[in-house]
Amino acid sequence: MLKLSASFAALAVLLPLVSAQAAEWGQCGGIGWTGATTCVSGTTCVESNAYYSQCLPGLPTSTSSASGSSSTSTAKLQTVAKAAGKLYFGTATDNSELTDTAYTAILDDNTMFGQITPANSMKWDATEPTQGTFTFSGGDQIASLAKTNGMLLRGHNCVWYNQLPSWVTSGTWTNSTLTAVIQNHCSTIVSHFKGQVYSWDVVNEPFNDDGTWRTDVFFNTIGESYVPIALNAARTADPNAKLYINDYNIEGPGAKATAMLNLVTSLKQQNVPLDGVGFQCHFIVGELPQGLAANWARFTALGLEMAVTELDIRMTLPSTPALLAQQKTDYTTVISACMSVAGCVGVTVWDWTDKYSWVPSTFSGQGAACPWDQNFVRKPAYDGIAGAFQA
Ligand SMILES: *[C@@H]1O[C@H](CO)[C@@H](O)[C@H](O)[C@H]1NC(C)=O
């Protein structure tokens, strides 16, 4: 008995030591975790999410911190963008990410980001899930975050073929009933955020890659005039918001860019309210289109502003030092193009960290598209962005 008690006493004394290192597969971190934060030899503490980190067998995987592949810039991106004469460097964010305190610690730095875009919560399915019933809680949270942090807000978006509730896609419409639906949707969401939004993507992705009109419910029912209908409704709802048309694969010259140029030229000629064109810039490492700046200048020559609205540059995984170096070059190319076009007002990345990038779930086998990795470590791409603003 005495021996047993002694053993228990010894165990009790040892407990703090035992808990100082978590066992293989044991928890080693997360919000609210008060236990061991280091792992036993041969295992590494890996974050699963903000609430749970676990000791996994093996050494730390070398990602962007591999020798020669890390960021060294001490510049803050909004600071250098402003100093370069741009309005903002910004990022998309999403409501579900805002509970991640390590994420918001970086997001909330307005010397890093001068602008945010809600990735999803102002889209049609989020704002008018049932006809005539509007829900703004998600959008309001992003709008109030922008206000609290002193950041510009981009509204995204009014009319788009995707993420539509089924009552829109499956409704039985005439030209005039669907026109009324667009007018009500755009005017209600734009007026709700009136005074809080720097620019709105009023129309998103109207064209196919060959430059023909995308045949969605809006085009099929109304024809091209759904575009001025939406723009006019938005202008009336918030006369001070910059109204944009936003698309991808229009960044370099080509059939789709020409279609967009022809559309915006025609809208300007008809005095339809339009202030800017958004070039999404979802790119692939090593495969950037040529002639970005010259193409963008064709649009700003019409008296429009433009912005890089959804920048990310993905690669086939796994990332390597060579891919990360090329990615840095590619980010530099995009920022340099914006720098050389006076009407390029700002650049928005489609989230700043790989942890919340849309890429891996959309493009199988691809990822690592953002300037920060999934552990919030800056990549060489970060230095590419900072350096181009400072050039
Ligand atoms: C729908 O009505 C508008 C006028 O509001 C007109 O410009 C347009 O051509 C019509 N579309 C079709 C497909 O008839």
Image (cartoon, rainbow, N blue to C red):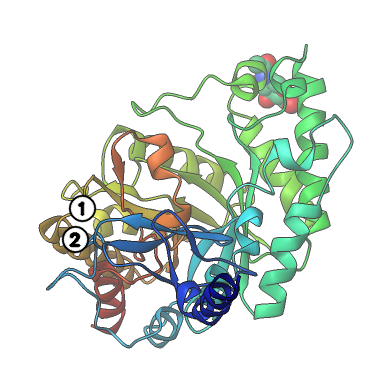
- Most foreground residue, 378 or 188: 378
Q: Closer to the camera, 211 or 350? A: 350
Quadrant of the image containing the C terminus? bottom left
Secondary element type, mark 1: loop
Percent from the top left, x then y, of residue 368? 31, 53
**Residue at the (50%, 37%) spot, across then down:** 205
Give how far across and how far down residue 208 sits, in percent: 41, 27
Say which amino acid is labelled 2.
Answer: Leu
Say few, some or many: other residues with alpha carbon within 10 Å of mark 2 (under 14 / 14 to 19 / 20 or more).
many
Task: Decide if residue 214 is on the left or right side of residue 261.
Answer: right
- The location of residue 123, given as percent across then percent down, is 67, 43
The residue pinned by badge 2 equals 324
**Left of 127 or right of it: where is 265?**
left
For the N terminus, the quadrant is: bottom right
User: Which secondary structure lies at badge 2?
Assistant: helix
Which of 5/124 is in front? Answer: 5
Q: Which residue is disc 1 drawn over?
A: 319
Which amino acid, mark 1?
A: Ser
